[in-house]
Image (cartoon, grey):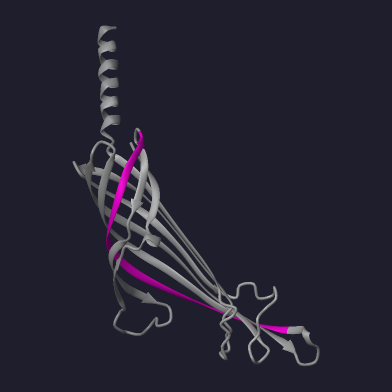
Amino acid sequence: MKHLIKFLLIFCFAELSAQKEQNFILSTHVGYNYTFEDKSDNFTFDFLVPGERKIQELNLSMSVGKKFRTNFYYGLGFALNWWKDEWNPNLNEPYPVDQTGMASSSFVSNYVYSPLAYLQYFANLGGRAQLTFSLISRYDFEKTTAGYKILQPSPLNGDDDFTIRTSERETTWEFFYTGLVPGFRLNLYKSFGMNVAFGDVAYRIKTADSRLPDMDIKKSREFNVNFRPENWRMGFYLAF
């Protein structure tokens, strides 16, 4: 019996020590942007008449990491990004016309899914806050859909009747991305807290393009230094 009690005490102490060590971390980040512009007074003689413009963007990421040194994590995760730009989205309520008597709307929608891996260094700022630097590599599967709708009054029935013409096309790309993302982590309660990511310094190269499947061409490349507040992302973390 004494040996059993000793074993249970040692086991409980080991479990508490392991919990206190907190070798794993689950992190999330979310960002959302919305822009609405009313350009109805900016009439031109172009075919597409400026009217209302609506832009939306949503991005989400989630990752799980393991501590392998005192101030380092490494881990895996995924990211999702959705973006849509619309001109005259409410074409029927009522619609603006150009000099030809036509009205039109257009949109571009972009969706990206990205598996990722990361290496993170964190520096303690007191007992509750940490400054983080994450080196992230991911592979982007991107799909873009673009289309338009045109309302044209019938020459026989006038403005009370109109025909509708629509068109839509889809393009897919693949990219390799690597970037350095600075951030901030604040403990709110025990092992639970808040994350903030402050943009990135990133390099991105195109690896596939559905428009040019069989052509051996130079791949396009991008280098961005982006710390604008509208690109900051917030989320939460759980250490365990």
Q: Nearer the viewer, residue 183 or 25?
A: 183
The answer to which quarter of the image holds residue 226 is bottom left
The majority secondary structure of the magenta stretch comes to strand
The answer to which quarter of the image holds residue 69 is top left
Q: Nearer the viewer, residue 194 or 110?
A: 194
Which residue is depicted at the point 40% across and 73% down?
A: 173
Magenta-drawn stretch contains 183 = yes
Q: Quadrant of the N terminus?
A: top left
Magenta-drawn stretch contains 59 = no
Name above or below for residue 141 compared with residue 6: below
Name above or below for residue 13 compared with residue 107: above
Which residue is depicted at the point 69% across and 75% down?
A: 92
Which residue, as the protein is rendered here, is positioned at the far top?
A: 1
Q: Position of residue 223 (x, y in %)?
A: 28, 72
Name above or below for residue 163 compared with residue 25: below
The answer to which quarter of the image holds residue 232 is bottom left
Q: Position of residue 48 (x, y in %)?
A: 57, 85
Q: Nearer the viewer, residue 131 or 240?
A: 131
Which residue, as the protein is rendered here, is positioned at the far front?
A: 41
Which residue, as the protein is rendered here, is positioned at the far left?
A: 70
Which residue is depicted at the point 37% across and 83% down?
A: 214
Q: Quadrant of the C terminus?
A: top left
Question: Magenta part of the protein: which range?
Answer: 163-189
